[in-house]
Amino acid sequence: MVVIAILIFGARKGALVATVALGLFDIFNGYAAEVWITILESLIVCLVLYLVFEKLLKSNDKIVNVIIAGVIAALTKIILNFLKYTIINTIIASLPLKAAMLASVIKIGGTFGTSVVTIIAVPLLYPVFKRILKKD
């Protein structure tokens, strides 16, 4: 998870960890053609989390800030996927903008599900991983 990587390792190391992990996942699971967009999306989410969590919230990992980071990451991913599919539908499928946007909303249904999982999982998993890494 990109959010947990940023929270634990900071923006630079977290971006590297998230990018490598997601890139390898795509390559090993038959999505090699899309690996570049996965990495780009991941880096944008990392940038947004850097600005919000590290700059605005001063890397304060109290639970409310961890929840905020999860929500911000989820919303960022929804917006990115909406924009991505709108562009694809407009350019590749030659749809008018309104039709492309409507098709994009339908296409990102799964993104809403993973966003809810992110919002729930981040505050649950972050303290666990933080404790595990502090033991070393």
Image (tube, grey):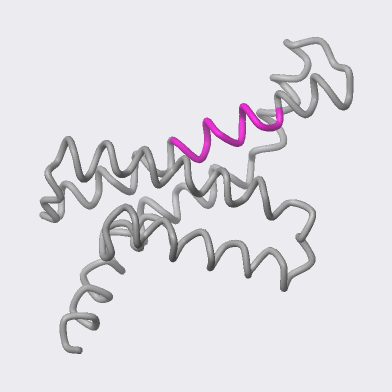
- Residue drawn at 62 percent across, 50 percent down: 38
- Residue drawn at 54 percent across, 42 percent down: 112
Residue 84 forms part of the magenta stretch:
yes
- Residue drawn at 44 percent across, 43 percent down: 45
Residue 40 position, x and y percent, is 57, 44
Residue 67 forms part of the magenta stretch:
no
Residue 76 sits in which quadrant?
A: top left
- Residue drawn at 42 percent across, 54 percent down: 118
Residue 23 position, x and y percent, is 61, 62
Q: Which residues are magenta?
A: 76-85
Could you tell me which quadrant the N terminus lies in? bottom left
Name the magenta segment's main secondary structure: helix
Residue 123 position, x and y percent, is 26, 59
112 with respect to 131 (left or right):
right
Residue 24 sits in which quadrant?
A: bottom right
Tell me how many marks there are. Answer: 0
| Residue 27 higher or lower than 69, as above or below | below
* Residue that sits furthest to the bottom in the current view: 136
Residue 125 sits in which quadrant?
A: bottom left
102 with respect to 11 (left or right):
right
70 with respect to 109 (left or right):
left
49 with respect to 42 (left or right):
left
Q: Nearer the viewer, residue 67 or 53?
A: 53
Could you tell me which quadrant the C terminus lies in? bottom left
Q: Nearer the viewer, residue 85 or 99?
A: 85
Q: Nearer the viewer, residue 113 or 35?
A: 35
Residue 32 position, x and y percent, is 76, 60
